Structures are given as C-alpha cells and as structure tokens.
Image (cartoon, grey):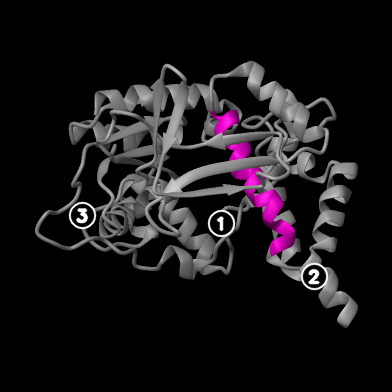
Amino acid sequence: MAALKEEDRAETWYADWVEYQAKHRLYAGVLSPKAYSSHGCQLDLLRLTRFWESFAYFSPAHAYSLHVSFLGLFPILMSANEPLKRESVARLEGGGLFAFGVSERAHGADLLANEFTVRDTPAGRVADGAKCYIGNANAAGLMSVLGKKGGTNRRSPLVLVAHSGAGYLLPQLGVTQRAARRAVGGYVFLDAGIPAPRPSTRLDLLAAEHPAMADDLDVLLAAGGRFPPWTADDLRELVPDEALRTAVVDSVRPRGRDFFTEVLPFPTGEIGWPDAPCGLLQTSAAYAATARSARSRGWPVIERDGGHFASCVDPHGVARDLLALVDRM
C-alpha cells in the first residue's frame, strides 16, 4: 500500500497511462473524425461516452488528459481552418495531447460568462484575464485559447436548438437558462415538435399534430410495446453510412407508456411563451403539419431534403440552414 501511495503522489501511473494511450492510439480512436483520419478512426460520441465511463473504475485523473484534449481539439474541428484540422488530427493519431486555455471570473464559471479578451497589438495577440486555466500545457503540442475578441463586450444571447421530441422541452429549457442569467435570443425546432401553451403529455402533443400516428402509438404502448423500435435495417435508406447508422441505432432508447404520458413542464409566468423569436427547419415529411403550424404562427420555416436524421448525414448543410433560419428570426 505504501508503494501504491507513493506512485500516486509521484503520478507515476499517470505518465504510464498517457504513454500507453499514445502507443495504442486510444484517444485518436474515439476523437478523430473519419474525414481527417489516416488510420480509419471514427468520431463517435456514444463510443466516447462509454470510453469515459470506463474511467469511473479507475480515477478522474486517468481521464483528465482525455477531457482536456477533447476541449482543446474541438474548437479546432469546429473552425474553418482545414490545414490546422488535418495537422491536429495527425498529432492526435501520433499520440499527442491537446491543451485548453481559458480565463474565468471564478472557478467553475461557464464560457457564456467569459470575460477573457484577446487583443491585436503590434507585438502580436495579447490575452487578458483575471484568472487563467490551462490544462495539459505540460504535454500538449497545440493549445486552444477561448476568449472574446477585444472590443466585443456585448454578450451574445443563446439560440436553443432542439431535434425531434426534444422540441417539446424547449420552453422549460429556456426558463433554466434565464434562471442562470443567460439571455435567450431564440428557439429553433429542427424537425421537432412544437410545444402547446399548457402542460401536456407527449402523446397529447403528437395527437394534435398527427392524430392517426398518435392512435397507433397509443395502441402499441397499451400492449406493453416501446417506441421507437428502430433497427439498422429500418434506417438504411435515411442513414446510408453503416458506422453512422449503427451509432444512431445504438443511441436510441425505446420508451414505454409512462414516458409518453408524462406531463411535460411548461413555464407559467407573466411573460408567457414564446419569450423569444422562433423558427423551424423541416427535414422530413413527418413534420410537414408541424411546419404548417409554425407558418401559421408567423415563424420562418426552411425546408430541406435529407430525412429526420439530416443533421447526422449532412451536418454542414444543416448548420448552414440553421444559420440562415436564425438570420430570418
């Protein structure tokens, strides 16, 4: 036991783990996007989550290098800098780690409250902040520094986006964000259901938009069935890529009657809902009636082909449509 404690204090096992993952490309296996990988890796959030869960049997410190690498890598992958993306993935697949730098007002503050600024000066860019945090800095080859450009002190409001049945939860999600003093600038329904202006169940809301579908679902649930019972064959046409289709099917959690008859929370107060502009992006015929309802409310609506899982199959195209929709809201 004394020897184990000494190894813990000296972080011997931590260095061993970082070396081991680099040798076997473990982090690259769950973080490298397929489009940039030279080793057939595939970014898969479900596999990544399960990989993180395995660390629960060890210690949080084992996962630290992966957590921070995730935070440092993804701002790069979300950027438009293609050469840097390819360089970053090459470093990752070579066993490298990434660092993440930010300045906060206090420990645990979120990025929406971030007051970190980066200013251009004749000598280069200067980052200012009262409290700085840098993770993996001792081992990383690249570091992402997140902050606001100097002179842009106005805090941008949130635009909340929900897909499918999550649309029914947007009003209450807006309440929680406002309670945290975050400004909500809009709500976007991505092939998603629109909530009713009162507490309702998912079955009630479905019946208002698709009566026949709600009747069939009610019969299925009454017989003890669960929904959705999708298989890989069911989604073959909607999600042609096999790895992506498997990930989608694995992430689905069929639910029973209690889930669909649960009364969903709806904000009650003087302001009412919607308390910000709304818009809808329709990607499947199943939400045609929902799109008509959105138009009747005066909301902007954009239609695109691609099916219910368009955001998985063509994320860049859907992102462009979302930005265009927000511009019209």
Q: Is residue 137 or residue 16 the one in the foreground?
A: 137
Query: 323 left or right of 125?
Result: left
Mark number, residue 8: 2
Dot in front, 1 or 2: 2
The local crowd at label 2, few if under 14, some if 14 to 19, many if 20 or more residues have their Cα within 10 Å, is: few
- Per the model, the C-alpha gap separating discs 1 and 3 is 25 Å
**116 or 130: nearer the eye?**
130
Residue picked out by circle 3: 197
Alpha-carbon span between mark 3 and mark 2: 55 Å
Q: Which mark is residue 227?
A: 1
**Element marked by disc 1:** loop
Q: Does 129 appear above or below 37?
A: below
Considering depth in this image, is 50 or 300 the residue closer to the camera? 50
Residue occupying image coordinates x 29% and y 37%: 156
| Residue 2 x, y percent position in the rendering | 87, 82
Earlier along the polypeptide chain: callout 3 or callout 2?
2
Mark 1: few, some, or many residues within 10 Å (few <14, many ≥20)?
A: some
User: Does residue 255 appear anywhere in the picture?
Assistant: yes
Q: Which residue type carries mark 1?
A: Phe
Quadrant containing the N terminus is: bottom right
Q: How far across and down, in percent of the image, does residue 53 sit?
A: 70, 62
